[in-house]
Image: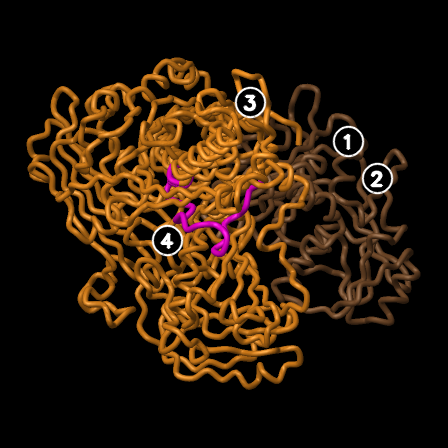
Amino acid sequence: MKDSTVAIGTALPRADGPGKVCGTEKYAADYYPEGMLWAGVKTSDYAHALVKEIDVSAALIIPGVHAVLIHKDVKGSNRVGVPESDAPVLADYKVCHKGDPVALIIAESREMVSRAAAAINVEYQALPAVFDPEQALLPDAPVLHENRADKNLLLSGAINKGKGALALEECTFSVESEFNLPAQEHAYLETETGVACLNDDGVLELVASTQTPFRDRMELAHALGLPATKIKISAPYLGGGFGGKDGITVQGLLGLAALNSSGRPVKMWNSREESFKSSSKRHPARMHYRLGCKQDGSLHALSCRIVLDTGAYASLGGPVLALAMEHAAGVYRIENTYIEGFCVYTNNPISGAFRGFGAPQVLAAVEQMIDMLADKIGMDPLEFRLKNAVNRGDELGSGVLMSRSTGIVACLQTMQKHPLWINRRQWEKDAPPFKRRAVGMAAGMQGTGYGPVVADVANAKLELLVDGRFRIYSGVADMGQGNNATNVQIAGEILGQSAAAFELLQPDTERSLPSGSSSASRTTYSFGNALQGACRLLKERILTRVCQMGMGIYQEDLLLVPGRVHHIPSGKDIPLTVIATAMTDSERVSVNSYTAPVARHHEIVNPAVRAAGFPHLVFCFACHLARIEINELTGEVTICDYLACTDGGRVLNPQLYEQQIQGGIVQGIGYALWEDFKVSAGEILSSNLSTYIIPGSLDVPDIISLPVETVEDSGPFGMKGIGEIGINLPYPAIANAVARATGRRIKTGPLSAERVWQALQAEEEQ
Amino acid sequence: MKKVLFPLNVEEMWSMWQDNPEAGLLAGGTDLLVKLRSQRIRLKTIICLEKVKELQQINTDGAQIFIGAMTNHQQLLENQVVKSRLGCLHQAAAVLGSPPIRHMGTIGGNICTASPAGDTLPPLYVLQANLELVSPTGSRIVPIEEFIYGPGKTALAPMEVLKQVIIDLPVPGIQTHYHKVGQRKALAISVCSLACYMQLAPDGSVGEARLAWGSVGPTVMRFPEVEALLYGRKISLDILRQCGELASQKVTPISDVRAGAEYRRRLTANLLIRLLPD
């Protein structure tokens, strides 16, 4: 690779680019170990039932079927899930949704796996099921997990600030509405997959498509009854994750299979239909909102109720609710708020982590409320937001103090000056026949990291290789966001090296160090901080060693440059290869641990919600604008132009930055207009990508991304994580435009052509 | 494992088929492979028609065009005669699936799948396409409207193959169009589609008009009463609305995971408005 500048702030080409483009980079799905077997599952026919008997005899006699395993074959707890360990590797006494795995088949081919699955006979005793989260909260509702004191309630909480909802009565203007948002499927290119093998030393080795290799290892140890020291997991680049691989997907089944395959390696790779059935989704949300302001347009009171459907198992439902509550009042100063939230078990497919983590739902609601209120008092929606947006030192409506870089006002001002905003009325007027045009906007934020209770720790490891290059031992998986590439930029900047000087080791529980999940907009923030320290340590050690090699006592005289150390006074150079050879193995390796700061004092919310991650300390901010055109004849919505102004702190690499913003927006546009994960009585109706519609390249416009740079002094080189913020605002920005164009609020998502057409009809009939 | 046979000509095709009477015919595979994958059908043997030379070519004698059944949608899209003379068929090929699907799927496959959502079908209905069906013992010509009689149901007899599509090339003064509503801009199955064929007099009044809707009934639908409304009239919003109202009463759409019946009914009417001159 030719040398290119790595300076922070430049568009260094992605280190993972060439290998991915040429097809040489191996994803977990690309592993086909010699002599391997295929594993697959038989899933439940019922949404809720007791499992009376599992007869696998007919499957076992199929030639090529190596083994069929059921819950009795699991030697450990048979439960996975963080923070609640409630999902079975294989269903034991009951099934709680139609994707529950009941038996695991190991066979010579995938075809044999599916034939065996069909031959397994399971006797069920059907139980009454519940599919509506509000009904699941009723006292006589069927209970999914009998051991829970709170029955179907996974987590609930309330924030009561100031006078709470009572203050709505003091408002001059108020609006009220409810919103229903559907589940969203991650739809990553690479469905859940991995290979596993029990090696000769009795170590279970897994290569998996996972955002959490280190956490998976502890979970597998518990679930399968193995010491963690007997489990090794490596996480190659993922073909997409978006939160759907934040935790165990196929790893438990794979591990179990490899423990029962007579030492042969086992591969598992979900079909798209299996992926849709078994993987977690974005939580469907029901939200009821009331919002009021004073005569002068200052927000005064907000009351809302948020109900999230977490499906059959908890997954990360609790933390998602906590983050939703934290973001429920948007980016505004609101003195009086009452925010209550419920995360509820039902017999629907599982909901869990998904880019945005609860924020897309509540921001879709509150940002529409803001527009409705602005309309009511006749204020410009952007002015209205500017008037109420937080500055550093202010408290959000949810009671969270903005103590770090806070750039929402600057984002709004940037949009206010942009031609797409300034010329919006004329553009709307120029709509062609049978078309309606409107411009909508929305503002919001994303808290980064794990919150105040779960330590957000990253451990970076860096090695000077004997050939004079450096190896970065990544502790956090790269699911496509480019954190590994950014690691090169950070290390290159500090060590004065070119990109070619770095070798990247993907996370591996044996060789790299635990550094938390690839999630929560914290990957580069936390690991980058750890890596900076490791770079400085190693640099110091290299320079010290050069001094010891006879170059004097002043490190200030030495300059680390590509491939060598330059001694300024003498003009002499010492190659890094020479220095590396002079160092011992342990000396060439530096390790640095970093723990992210947290907001410590917070009594506004109940301890259970706090434990689930409320509040965050560092936030990134954004406002988005969408220019849309509605076809009056069909209800189809076309996004003509899109603008995003984002405060993600300092931009380390403008290209990676833009990719993250654009990717988030495209996924958010899908959430707004097309993606409708349809489930009826626990049965998935949109069972694959032919009926679950995600946007294609013709459906999204060119996206303008304007960074509004603040400096986040706790972030490496002033950055904040922007992996999620992009997805939070397309829904409300587009919904506000649709409402402006049709005169109607569509309260159920997505804003499909059919729903928009219905809104137009309603207007006509009025 | 499946056996896949590749006959090089019609003669070989018959003999392979006679040796494997249970075989399925693969004319591109964009439907067949989906059905095989989801196990809606099971086949031990597949006869792939992509190398059968008699089914490939597009010919014209100036008055008619002969489109071989194995012509793929991309070839259809690129054909200059189709482009200049059969606008509605060209437009349908342009919005059919995606580039990979257009390179695999064929016009013959689209016809024999007989889905009411098939994009080439409404154009073929308004063009009054004739289908040449061949069997080891002979051939016959069947108009497309008689060939398809239900979703997935065709007049193909056992051991019979669609050889080519024969269309009279419209004379100058004929305009044809295809309009489609899908769930997104590409790679989308039609929720409602409309093909139209109109003979326009110099004064703008309509002579013969043919209209065919897709995805709003068990087959592509034409309504002579609706077409008759246009006769002798100039195209106006008013007349198109009248036609739309009548057509929307006649279609028999279903509600499914893609769209509701009421919405499809309304699209039936509204797609006509797109026929207004710009």
- Residue B65: image tag: 2
Quadrant assignment for the C terminus of chain A: top left
On whether residue A509 falls in the magenta region, the answer is yes
Which residues are drawn in magenta?
Answer: A503-526
Q: In 3D space, how far apart are the residues under numbered discs 4 and 2 (Cα atoms)?
A: 56 Å
- Residue A352: image tag: 4
| Residues at discs 3 and 2 in contact (Cβ within 8 Å) | no
Q: Which amino acid does label 4 sit on?
A: Gly
Q: Where is residue A744 in the image (x, y as percent from the top left)?
A: 32, 34
| Residues at discs 2 and 1 in contact (Cβ within 8 Å) | yes
Which is in the foreground here, disc 3 or disc 4? 3
- Residue B85: image tag: 1
Q: Is residue A608 left or right of residue B80?
A: left
Secondary structure of the residue carrying numbered label 2: strand
Which residue carries the number 3 mark?
Answer: A566
Disc 4 packing (10 Å; few <14; some 14–19; many ≥20) = many
